[in-house]
Image (tube, helix red, strand yellow):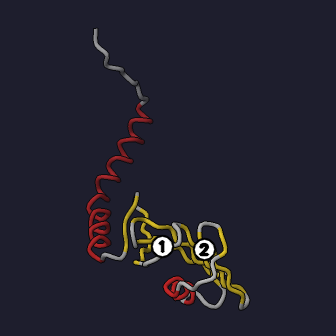
Amino acid sequence: MSDTQVTWLTQEAYDRLKQELDELIANRPVMAAEINARREDGDLWSIAARTIDVVELSFDGGDEIELVENEGSTELRVDGQPWNEQIPALERAGETLGTDFVVQADRLDGDLWEIRASAL
């Protein structure tokens, strides 16, 4: 007796799945080229087809950082706790968006950090 399990599809379901597969196969070279280009740049990593901004930051205070600049007030938290020192690289990342912003950073490995910046 065989352990093979059989799944039956309607013609409509088969056609839909076949069309999706054909589209994925057709778009594969474009997606592969985009991933390789980002790898070669060295400043972006691709994770599940989502690119992230990566900075090199020598910081031993924790693994999660949040910097908020709002109406002239600055709040910096490291691992959820207030932090009194400045982190210029994160300030520069936020300042590209204007005077009010949030920058979040998560340690990837060693001195490599993923950063996300949003204007307020």
Q: Position of residue 75 (x, y in %)?
A: 68, 80
Q: Quadrant of residue 30?
A: bottom left
In the image, 100 versus 82, the foreground residue is: 82
Q: Is residue 61 above or below residue 24?
A: below
Q: Report helix, strand or loop for mark 1.
A: loop
Q: Residue at coordinates 50% horizontally, 73% vertically from top-left?
A: 115
Q: Residues within 10 Å of mark 2 (few under 14, many from 20)?
A: many
Q: Residue at coordinates 36% horizontally, 20% vertically from top-left?
A: 5
In the image, 16 versus 96, the foreground residue is: 96
Residue extending farthest to the top is 1
Image disc number at residue 37: none
Q: For the residue marked with disc 1, what is the amino acid?
A: Asp
Q: Position of residue 107 (x, y in %)?
A: 46, 67
The residue labelled by disc 1 is 60
Q: Give the side of residue 27 with respect to residue 62, left or right.
A: left
Q: Give the side of residue 36 with respect to residue 6, left or right.
A: left
Q: For the residue marked with disc 2, what is the amino acid?
A: Glu
Which tag, 2 or 1, sits closer to the chain's start?
1
Q: Position of residue 74 (x, y in %)?
A: 68, 85
The residue labelled by disc 2 is 66
* Quarter containing the N terminus: top left
Q: Report helix, strand or loop for mark 2.
A: strand
Q: Nearer the viewer, mark 2 or mark 1?
A: 1
Cα–Cα span, label 2 and label 1: 15 Å
Q: Is residue 2 above or below residue 74?
A: above
Q: Give the side of residue 24 with respect to residue 74, left or right.
A: left
* Quarter containing the C terminus: bottom right
